Image (cartoon, grey):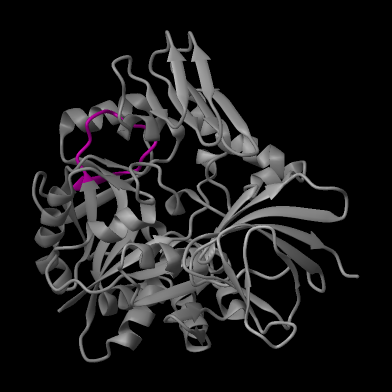
Amino acid sequence: MVLVPVILSGGSGTRLWPLSRRQHPKQLQALVGDRTMLQRTVARAEGLPEVGAPLVVCNEAHAELVAAQLRAIERPAAAIVLEPLGRNTAPAVAVAALVARARSPQVEPLLLCLPADHVVHDEAAFREAVVQGLPLAQAGRLVTFGIVPDRPHTGYGYIRAATPGRPGPVEAFVEKPDRSTAEGYLSAGGYYWNSGMFLLRADAFLQELGALRPEILAACERAVAAAERRAGEQWALDRESFAACPSDSIDYAVMEETTRASVVPLDAGWSDVGSWDALHEVSEHDEAGNARVGDVLALDCEGCHLHARHRLVAAVGLHDVVVVETDDAVLVAPRARSEDVKRVVSELDVRGRPEAREHGERWASWGHARRLAGPAGVELWELHVAAGHRVPGPAMDGGQRRVVVVAGRARLEPSPDGVAATLVAGDSVALDGTLALWAEDGELELVAIDRGPS
């Protein structure tokens, strides 16, 4: 047996705007503790029997950042599957299964499919539930994990188990209920929240997908067969083939239709962190029930989620309110209406505002950058480049980039005069396709001046 953690990292997380943006979604940010959600998810699988390196499925735009975050925790991926566009979880798991089988033709892999943006506080309980599910998955059952409910939540789908309290077959998947129906589920027992986490043998899942949704399987097979293999075990799926794949969740496409579904109860302090209110529930609180992140001053506040990224946030007399400050936007909303944040993102999209898609800050494998105010036709960036990495070139095709060293040492290759050159604070150079600037023994801080084509 080989157990492959499949990390599903394709979401955009718009309900956690302004922290989460399409170019830097919530799973790539540290929302709980010092590690990002992706890093926490990968670490969660450690200690499981016969567990291998993770296989990550993510948006092609996030490839560098995903690889860098895994390197930072010294857990490089067995493979990173790059989606050219989102097609939901059924195709994501299908391409993961196809790649896992291609990489392990001698042993049929078991896939532990985990969304990259969930919180699990009791990781020992999580691992115990996975161990309970292993015999079922090895026997060809498609295993899901049902969260033991602690309240009548109306935002989750439910699973009705045939054998309440222990692993066994699924009797039915139930859509998100109203309040009274959810209360009835809790009173009756044997109902679990649908977690979106799965344990399944790769061939068993592909067989069932082929029987139930053959068009999805066929499109995924074509996308993987024509994938571009890149450095770092990256599989860039063929865009045309994957674009032709129907978009559907694994729940709708397979789990709700198959006769092979089993459920393992899981009581491990789980949350899908689907809103600011949900994040507040799993965050540390002060004596007044406030969650405070960053430079926050809270006077006479109760039950608030106060998040500061770049400057002091001072709040007075607030109750059950969310305040989130980033480099270019501030959100203020009642916690009870935090689900409506996605309406803000939709409205920003309609207005063509870049804040819907990206931060003024950007992160990459080489370091990070922050946009500064500049004159028309010129972009100014503050760059922080990690030791041993190359300073990126101009942002615009055919454009020009002049960089000014603020702190650290940089090596210019080749030197304009043919002699090795070192740049220090106060030095500047214009970069083009013939020159490369590298950070030497420590972090390099620069200001980059980008102009359009000359």
- Residue 409, given in percent of the width and then of the height, sits at 56, 65
Quarter placement of the N terminus: bottom left
Quarter placement of the C terminus: bottom right
Residue 158 part of the magenta segment: yes
Q: Nearer the viewer, residue 61 or 274?
A: 61
Residue shown at the point (77%, 41%) measured from the top left: 351
- Residue 338, given in percent of the width and then of the height, sits at 50, 29
Residue shown at the point (35%, 25%) measured from the top left: 179
Quarter of the image for residue 417 reads bottom right
Residue 350 is left or right of residue 48, and the answer is right
- Residue 75, given in percent of the width and then of the height, sits at 30, 68
- Residue 362, given in percent of the width and then of the height, sits at 59, 54
Q: Nearer the viewer, residue 292 or 53?
A: 292
Residue 301 is left or right of residue 195, and the answer is right
Quarter of the image for residue 201 reads bottom left
Image position of 227 with respect to 19: above or below:
below
Residue 76 is left or right of residue 382, and the answer is left
Image position of 446 with respect to 1: above or below:
above
Q: Please say whether residue 162 is visible from this viewpoint.
A: no
Residue shown at the point (82%, 74%) measured from the top left: 398
Q: Nearer the viewer, residue 6 or 74?
A: 74
Q: What is the span of residues highlighted in magenta in the rendered image?
A: 147-161
Judged from this view, the residue extending furthest toward the right is: 454
Q: Main secondary structure of the magenta part?
A: loop
Number of dots carrying numbers: 0
Judged from this view, the residue extending furthest toward the bottom is: 106
Q: Please say whether residue 326 is visible from this viewpoint.
A: yes
Residue shown at the point (40%, 46%) measured from the top left: 30
Quarter of the image for residue 239 reads bottom right
Residue 62 part of the magenta segment: no
